[in-house]
Image (tube, helix red, strand yellow):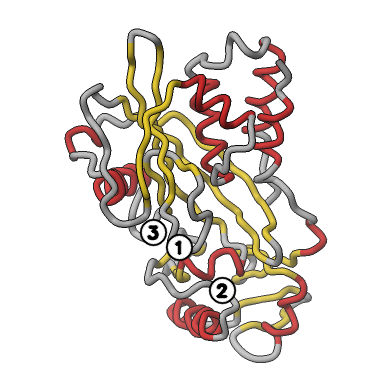
Amino acid sequence: MSAERYLQRVAACRGIDPTSFEPWFVGERRAGRVHRDHVPELLAGPPFRRAAGRLTLDAPPEHRTRALADVVARLAAAGRIRPLTGEPYPVLADASPPFTIDRAGVPWFGVHAFGVHGNGFVRTASGLEVWVATRARGKSTFAGHLDNLVAGGIAAGLDAVTTLRKECREEADVPAELAARAVAVGRIDYVHADGSSLKDDTLFCFDLELPPEFEPRPVDGEVERFDRWPAAVVAASLRGDALWKPNCALVALHFLLRHGCLDDELDRASRDRVWQALHAPAWR
Protein backbone atom coordinates (compact mmCIF):
# COMPACT_ATOMS: atom_id res chain seq x y z
CA MET A 1 0.00 0.00 0.00
CA SER A 2 1.22 3.51 -0.77
CA ALA A 3 2.45 5.92 1.88
CA GLU A 4 1.08 8.92 -0.02
CA ARG A 5 -1.98 9.50 2.14
CA TYR A 6 0.14 9.53 5.29
CA LEU A 7 2.55 11.95 3.62
CA GLN A 8 -0.41 14.20 2.80
CA ARG A 9 -1.28 14.30 6.50
CA VAL A 10 2.24 15.52 7.21
CA ALA A 11 2.16 18.05 4.38
CA ALA A 12 -1.08 19.51 5.78
CA CYS A 13 1.00 20.98 8.62
CA ARG A 14 3.84 22.27 6.46
CA GLY A 15 2.31 24.60 3.88
CA ILE A 16 3.88 28.04 3.75
CA ASP A 17 5.03 30.72 1.33
CA PRO A 18 8.04 32.20 3.14
CA THR A 19 7.79 35.45 1.17
CA SER A 20 4.38 36.16 2.74
CA PHE A 21 5.77 36.68 6.22
CA GLU A 22 8.21 39.19 7.64
CA PRO A 23 10.25 38.52 10.77
CA TRP A 24 10.00 40.85 13.73
CA PHE A 25 12.77 41.33 16.22
CA VAL A 26 13.57 42.15 19.81
CA GLY A 27 17.04 43.60 19.71
CA GLU A 28 19.06 41.26 17.52
CA ARG A 29 16.80 38.25 18.02
CA ARG A 30 13.91 37.18 15.82
CA ALA A 31 10.83 36.81 18.01
CA GLY A 32 8.25 35.82 15.40
CA ARG A 33 6.89 36.45 11.91
CA VAL A 34 3.85 38.48 10.84
CA HIS A 35 2.05 38.43 7.54
CA ARG A 36 3.25 41.21 5.29
CA ASP A 37 -0.31 42.53 4.99
CA HIS A 38 -0.19 43.28 8.74
CA VAL A 39 3.11 45.17 8.72
CA PRO A 40 1.70 48.63 7.81
CA GLU A 41 -0.79 48.29 10.66
CA LEU A 42 1.99 47.52 13.13
CA LEU A 43 4.07 50.44 11.91
CA ALA A 44 1.17 52.89 12.23
CA GLY A 45 1.98 53.39 15.90
CA PRO A 46 3.90 52.07 18.88
CA PRO A 47 5.32 49.71 19.97
CA PHE A 48 6.68 48.61 16.56
CA ARG A 49 9.03 50.54 14.29
CA ARG A 50 11.67 50.03 11.65
CA ALA A 51 15.14 49.84 13.14
CA ALA A 52 18.15 49.10 10.96
CA GLY A 53 15.72 47.89 8.32
CA ARG A 54 14.01 45.44 10.68
CA LEU A 55 10.51 45.33 12.08
CA THR A 56 11.28 45.75 15.77
CA LEU A 57 9.35 45.72 19.03
CA ASP A 58 10.48 49.02 20.49
CA ALA A 59 9.79 48.69 24.22
CA PRO A 60 12.04 48.43 27.26
CA PRO A 61 12.50 44.84 28.46
CA GLU A 62 10.26 45.32 31.48
CA HIS A 63 7.44 46.74 29.29
CA ARG A 64 7.44 44.20 26.44
CA THR A 65 4.64 42.05 27.85
CA ARG A 66 2.41 45.08 28.36
CA ALA A 67 3.20 46.50 24.93
CA LEU A 68 2.26 43.24 23.19
CA ALA A 69 -0.81 42.85 25.40
CA ASP A 70 -2.16 46.20 24.22
CA VAL A 71 -1.84 45.22 20.57
CA VAL A 72 -3.34 41.75 21.11
CA ALA A 73 -6.26 43.24 23.06
CA ARG A 74 -7.03 45.62 20.18
CA LEU A 75 -6.94 42.75 17.69
CA ALA A 76 -9.27 40.66 19.84
CA ALA A 77 -11.68 43.57 20.36
CA ALA A 78 -11.82 44.08 16.60
CA GLY A 79 -12.53 40.38 15.99
CA ARG A 80 -9.23 39.94 14.15
CA ILE A 81 -8.16 37.09 16.41
CA ARG A 82 -10.10 34.85 18.76
CA PRO A 83 -11.01 36.16 22.22
CA LEU A 84 -8.23 36.46 24.76
CA THR A 85 -7.55 33.26 26.67
CA GLY A 86 -5.72 34.60 29.70
CA GLU A 87 -2.96 32.02 29.05
CA PRO A 88 0.47 33.68 28.81
CA TYR A 89 2.83 32.05 26.32
CA PRO A 90 6.54 32.79 26.42
CA VAL A 91 8.21 34.88 23.74
CA LEU A 92 11.96 34.27 23.77
CA ALA A 93 11.61 32.73 27.21
CA ASP A 94 15.34 32.94 27.82
CA ALA A 95 15.31 36.71 27.31
CA SER A 96 16.10 38.80 30.35
CA PRO A 97 13.57 39.42 31.69
CA PRO A 98 11.27 36.91 29.94
CA PHE A 99 8.11 38.32 28.38
CA THR A 100 4.83 36.80 27.26
CA ILE A 101 1.91 37.07 24.86
CA ASP A 102 -1.67 35.87 25.26
CA ARG A 103 -2.19 32.55 23.52
CA ALA A 104 -4.78 34.12 21.23
CA GLY A 105 -2.12 36.34 19.67
CA VAL A 106 0.53 33.66 19.11
CA PRO A 107 -0.39 32.71 15.49
CA TRP A 108 -0.98 36.33 14.41
CA PHE A 109 2.52 37.24 15.56
CA GLY A 110 4.03 33.92 14.42
CA VAL A 111 5.61 33.22 17.80
CA HIS A 112 7.28 29.84 18.26
CA ALA A 113 4.96 27.91 20.57
CA PHE A 114 5.44 24.64 22.43
CA GLY A 115 2.87 22.01 23.32
CA VAL A 116 2.43 18.49 24.63
CA HIS A 117 0.47 15.63 23.05
CA GLY A 118 -0.16 12.37 24.82
CA ASN A 119 -1.23 9.11 23.16
CA GLY A 120 -3.08 6.86 25.57
CA PHE A 121 -2.97 3.20 24.62
CA VAL A 122 -3.78 -0.27 25.90
CA ARG A 123 -2.13 -3.62 25.17
CA THR A 124 -4.62 -6.36 24.33
CA ALA A 125 -4.32 -9.96 23.17
CA SER A 126 -5.09 -8.81 19.62
CA GLY A 127 -2.67 -5.87 19.63
CA LEU A 128 -2.48 -2.22 20.61
CA GLU A 129 -5.58 -0.11 21.02
CA VAL A 130 -5.45 3.69 21.15
CA TRP A 131 -7.70 6.15 22.93
CA VAL A 132 -8.95 8.74 20.42
CA ALA A 133 -10.70 11.91 21.51
CA THR A 134 -13.46 13.70 19.60
CA ARG A 135 -13.22 17.43 20.15
CA ALA A 136 -16.26 19.22 21.53
CA ARG A 137 -18.66 20.58 18.92
CA GLY A 138 -18.58 23.98 20.57
CA LYS A 139 -14.83 24.52 20.27
CA SER A 140 -13.69 27.53 18.27
CA THR A 141 -11.08 25.49 16.39
CA PHE A 142 -11.48 22.08 14.73
CA ALA A 143 -14.78 21.35 16.45
CA GLY A 144 -15.75 17.69 16.19
CA HIS A 145 -12.35 16.64 14.84
CA LEU A 146 -10.34 13.69 16.13
CA ASP A 147 -7.60 14.36 18.65
CA ASN A 148 -5.07 12.60 20.85
CA LEU A 149 -5.95 11.52 24.39
CA VAL A 150 -4.68 14.82 25.77
CA ALA A 151 -2.94 17.86 24.34
CA GLY A 152 -2.23 21.41 25.34
CA GLY A 153 0.10 24.34 24.99
CA ILE A 154 2.93 24.93 27.41
CA ALA A 155 2.19 28.19 29.18
CA ALA A 156 4.85 30.48 30.60
CA GLY A 157 6.44 29.06 33.74
CA LEU A 158 5.55 25.43 33.01
CA ASP A 159 7.52 22.58 31.47
CA ALA A 160 6.39 19.73 29.24
CA VAL A 161 5.95 17.09 31.95
CA THR A 162 4.00 19.41 34.25
CA THR A 163 1.78 20.49 31.37
CA LEU A 164 1.09 16.91 30.30
CA ARG A 165 0.06 15.90 33.81
CA LYS A 166 -2.15 18.99 34.08
CA GLU A 167 -3.86 18.19 30.77
CA CYS A 168 -4.34 14.56 31.81
CA ARG A 169 -6.26 15.74 34.85
CA GLU A 170 -8.19 18.57 33.21
CA GLU A 171 -9.13 16.95 29.90
CA ALA A 172 -9.43 13.22 30.54
CA ASP A 173 -9.70 12.70 34.32
CA VAL A 174 -6.52 10.61 34.33
CA PRO A 175 -5.40 10.17 37.96
CA ALA A 176 -2.01 11.56 38.89
CA GLU A 177 -0.53 8.12 39.54
CA LEU A 178 -1.43 7.03 36.00
CA ALA A 179 -0.35 10.30 34.37
CA ALA A 180 3.05 9.90 36.05
CA ARG A 181 3.66 6.82 33.89
CA ALA A 182 3.74 8.87 30.68
CA VAL A 183 6.99 8.49 28.74
CA ALA A 184 8.53 11.19 26.55
CA VAL A 185 9.02 9.70 23.06
CA GLY A 186 10.19 12.55 20.87
CA ARG A 187 9.17 15.82 19.28
CA ILE A 188 7.63 17.07 16.05
CA ASP A 189 8.37 20.51 14.61
CA TYR A 190 6.44 22.24 11.88
CA VAL A 191 5.65 25.69 10.50
CA HIS A 192 2.35 26.17 8.69
CA ALA A 193 0.53 29.20 7.32
CA ASP A 194 -3.19 29.36 8.03
CA GLY A 195 -4.33 32.34 6.02
CA SER A 196 -2.47 35.30 7.46
CA SER A 197 -1.57 33.46 10.68
CA LEU A 198 1.53 31.37 11.22
CA LYS A 199 1.68 28.20 13.29
CA ASP A 200 5.30 27.74 14.37
CA ASP A 201 5.05 24.79 16.73
CA THR A 202 7.08 22.22 18.59
CA LEU A 203 5.08 19.27 19.91
CA PHE A 204 6.56 17.15 22.69
CA CYS A 205 5.08 13.66 22.30
CA PHE A 206 4.31 11.26 25.14
CA ASP A 207 3.05 7.69 25.34
CA LEU A 208 0.84 6.71 28.26
CA GLU A 209 0.06 3.02 28.65
CA LEU A 210 -3.24 2.65 30.49
CA PRO A 211 -4.84 -0.34 32.24
CA PRO A 212 -7.49 -2.10 30.13
CA GLU A 213 -10.17 -1.28 32.69
CA PHE A 214 -9.46 2.46 32.75
CA GLU A 215 -11.72 4.76 30.75
CA PRO A 216 -10.90 8.46 30.31
CA ARG A 217 -13.73 10.87 30.98
CA PRO A 218 -14.30 14.35 29.50
CA VAL A 219 -13.92 16.94 32.25
CA ASP A 220 -13.34 20.50 31.06
CA GLY A 221 -15.56 20.61 27.98
CA GLU A 222 -12.70 20.38 25.49
CA VAL A 223 -13.64 16.82 24.46
CA GLU A 224 -17.02 15.37 23.53
CA ARG A 225 -16.07 11.74 24.03
CA PHE A 226 -13.23 9.21 24.08
CA ASP A 227 -13.20 6.01 22.03
CA ARG A 228 -10.74 3.11 22.14
CA TRP A 229 -9.72 2.03 18.65
CA PRO A 230 -7.53 -0.83 17.44
CA ALA A 231 -4.35 0.56 15.94
CA ALA A 232 -5.47 -0.65 12.49
CA VAL A 233 -8.61 1.49 12.75
CA VAL A 234 -6.51 4.54 13.66
CA ALA A 235 -4.32 3.86 10.63
CA ALA A 236 -7.37 3.53 8.37
CA SER A 237 -8.74 6.83 9.65
CA LEU A 238 -5.45 8.55 8.82
CA ARG A 239 -5.40 7.01 5.32
CA GLY A 240 -9.00 7.98 4.77
CA ASP A 241 -10.98 11.18 5.05
CA ALA A 242 -11.51 11.22 8.83
CA LEU A 243 -11.44 14.73 10.23
CA TRP A 244 -8.33 14.77 12.39
CA LYS A 245 -7.02 17.98 13.89
CA PRO A 246 -3.98 18.29 11.59
CA ASN A 247 -1.20 18.33 14.19
CA CYS A 248 -2.87 15.54 16.19
CA ALA A 249 -2.79 13.38 13.06
CA LEU A 250 0.99 13.77 13.05
CA VAL A 251 1.24 12.60 16.65
CA ALA A 252 -1.01 9.60 15.98
CA LEU A 253 1.07 8.69 12.92
CA HIS A 254 4.27 9.05 14.98
CA PHE A 255 2.83 6.57 17.48
CA LEU A 256 1.86 4.01 14.82
CA LEU A 257 5.31 4.10 13.23
CA ARG A 258 7.18 3.76 16.51
CA HIS A 259 5.10 0.79 17.65
CA GLY A 260 5.37 -1.11 14.37
CA CYS A 261 1.65 -0.78 13.64
CA LEU A 262 2.32 0.01 9.97
CA ASP A 263 4.94 -2.70 9.40
CA ASP A 264 2.52 -5.05 7.62
CA GLU A 265 1.10 -2.24 5.50
CA LEU A 266 4.19 -0.35 4.35
CA ASP A 267 7.61 -1.59 3.35
CA ARG A 268 10.68 -0.30 5.16
CA ALA A 269 11.46 2.35 2.55
CA SER A 270 7.92 3.75 2.71
CA ARG A 271 7.94 3.84 6.50
CA ASP A 272 11.27 5.65 6.40
CA ARG A 273 9.82 8.24 4.00
CA VAL A 274 6.97 9.00 6.39
CA TRP A 275 9.29 9.11 9.42
CA GLN A 276 11.68 11.46 7.66
CA ALA A 277 8.79 13.68 6.59
CA LEU A 278 7.61 13.90 10.20
CA HIS A 279 11.08 14.96 11.30
CA ALA A 280 12.10 17.19 8.42
CA PRO A 281 13.58 20.48 9.69
CA ALA A 282 10.92 23.16 10.07
CA TRP A 283 11.37 26.45 8.22
CA ARG A 284 12.47 28.92 10.85
Q: Residue at x 61, y 89 (%)?
A: 46
Q: How many tags in the picture? A: 3
Instruction: Say above or below: 262 vs 190.
Output: above
Q: Earlier in the sequence, mark 3 or mark 1?
A: 1
Q: Could you give the CA–CA distance between mark 2 and mark 1, rounded to whole angstroms?
A: 18 Å
Q: Amino acid at mark 1?
A: Pro
Please state, as top left, top right, bottom left or bottom right, where the N terminus lies in the image: top right
Q: Amino acid at mark 2?
A: Ile
Residue projecting furthest to the right: 19
Numbered circle sitting on residue 11: none
Residue corresponding to mark 1:
90
Say few, some or many: other residues with alpha carbon within 10 Å of mark 2 (under 14 / 14 to 19 / 20 or more): some
Q: Residue at x 27, y 26 (%)?
A: 210
Q: Secondary structure at mark 3?
A: loop
Residue 266 in picture, x, y percent from top left: 66, 14
> For residue 180, what is the image quadrant?
top left
Residue corresponding to mark 3:
155
Q: Earlier in the sequence, mark 3 or mark 2?
A: 2
Say few, some or many: other residues with alpha carbon within 10 Å of mark 1 (under 14 / 14 to 19 / 20 or more): many
Numbered circle sitting on residue 81: 2
- Evaluate whether residue 162 shows in this view: no
Q: Secondary structure at mark 2?
A: loop
Instruction: Say above or below: 211 vs 191.
Output: above
Residue 269 in picture, x, y percent from top left: 71, 13
> For residue 198, what is the image quadrant?
bottom right
Q: Could you give the CA–CA distance between mark 3 and mark 2, rounded to whole angstroms?
A: 19 Å
Q: Are marks 3 and 2 in contact (CB under 8 Å)?
A: no
Give the left or right position of residue 75, taking residue 169 as reference: right
Give the left or right position of residue 47, taking residue 99 as reference: right
- Evaluate whether residue 71 shows in this view: yes
Foreground mark, 3 or 2, reads: 2
